[in-house]
Image (cartoon, grey):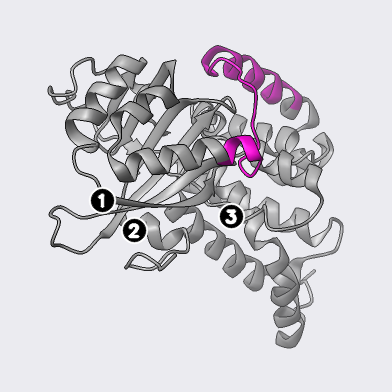
Amino acid sequence: MTATVLPAVDRDDFLRDAEAYRAELLAHCYKMVGSLHEAEDLVQETYLRAWRAWGSFEGRSSVRAWLYRIATNVCLTALRQSPRRVLPSGLGVPGQDPDVPMPAPAGEVLWLEPFPDLLGGGGDPAEVVAARSSLRLALVASLQHLPARQRAVFILREALAFPATEVADMLNMSVAAVKSALQRARARLDEVAASPETLVEPDSPAARAVLDRFMTAFERADVGAMTDLLRADASLEVVPLGRWLPGKRACLAHLAGHVLTTPGRYLLYPVVANGQPAAVAYRRRQAQEPHLPFGVTVLRTDGHQVTRITTFVDPALVRLFGFPDTPPEV
């Protein structure tokens, strides 16, 4: 029996209503593929497929669940052709000497990208906290170690709390297979997950104070202030250089020798990325030159000191985080 195709106006009404889910679908696709750029394309493909298939939607599930089914399967298709994305620490080769280039990893490396705070602008505070927690860089990096279907099951069940029966329908799996995949995913994440730390909300006074100190030290090229700010076990990683420097001493050697060299070289602006305090950065090479987009730096903090710095050197991220090509006036 051929499904009745609804009039185009109904499809247009559907797309207007479905726009309410765009931000959370973008976060979902990001967790699946580890890339903000790719996630935007996958969400666009999700809406295109939903618009084309609207006539076959029978209302047995909510529109939200239907969109998640399409988005998840779009991601699974994309992941067949793509290796997992990583952070430099995920390669397991620390760079002890900041003056020695990191060896090029074997094969093509796709790097994990940061994600802007699209879900924290309103809504229930508990839901915002949960959404941010599911986007932490360490967790998203750990998710990339899972096979694609296990990753999908884990995100749909754990982060989004869809029932096992609904996840089974989304992925054309049996309920038993969903439960088995979730169990295997949890076991694998226990193996690769970083040591748990106290989560500090990025807009809390403690986190904001740490971020303010970091930005001030960075802009002033104040190595002494940065020394006070970094915890003894702090680490630094830089994408796409592939550099991972564990330990405060190695971090400071790199920062003092290559980054914090001239006051005013960088301009930083506070943002939230992956549910963590972060900063959009502009840089100029010479004192007479203008500041240009540089990238995004994401911090992990215990509320008193910085425990990890992850810098993404990618000028395109500045615009994706809502900033112009020239530094805004403060």
SS assignment at label 3: helix
The magenta-colored residue range is: 179-208
Image location of residue 95, percent across then percent down: 24, 18
The answer to if 199 sits in the magenta stretch is: yes
Image location of residue 226, percent across then percent down: 36, 29
Query: At 52% from the left edge and 45% from the top edge, which residue is drawn?
Result: 273
Residue farthest right in this picture? 60
Magenta stretch, overall SS: helix
Query: At 55% from the left edge and 52% from the top edge, which residue is drawn?
Result: 74
Q: Which of the 4 quarters of the picture holds residue 82? A: top left
Does the image show residue 114?
Answer: yes
Q: Hey, what amino acid is under mark 3?
A: Leu
Q: Residue 261, relative to residue 100: is it above or below? A: below
Rounded to the nearest angstrom, the CA distance separating label 2 from label 3 is: 18 Å
Q: Hey, what amino acid is under mark 1?
A: Gly
Image location of residue 156, percent across then percent down: 71, 39
Q: Residue 264 carries which label?
A: 1
Judging by the rendered image, the residue that carries numbered circle 3 is 26
Rounded to the nearest angstrom, the CA distance separating label 1 from label 3 is: 35 Å
Judging by the rendered image, the residue that carries numbered circle 2 is 316
Task: Specify whether 145 is left or right of 268.
Answer: right
Which residue is more in the foreground, 109 or 234? 234
Q: Hey, what amino acid is under mark 2?
A: Ala
Task: Specify whether 126 is left or right of 118.
Answer: right
Query: At 66% from the left edge and 19% from the top edge, which residue is drawn?
Result: 186
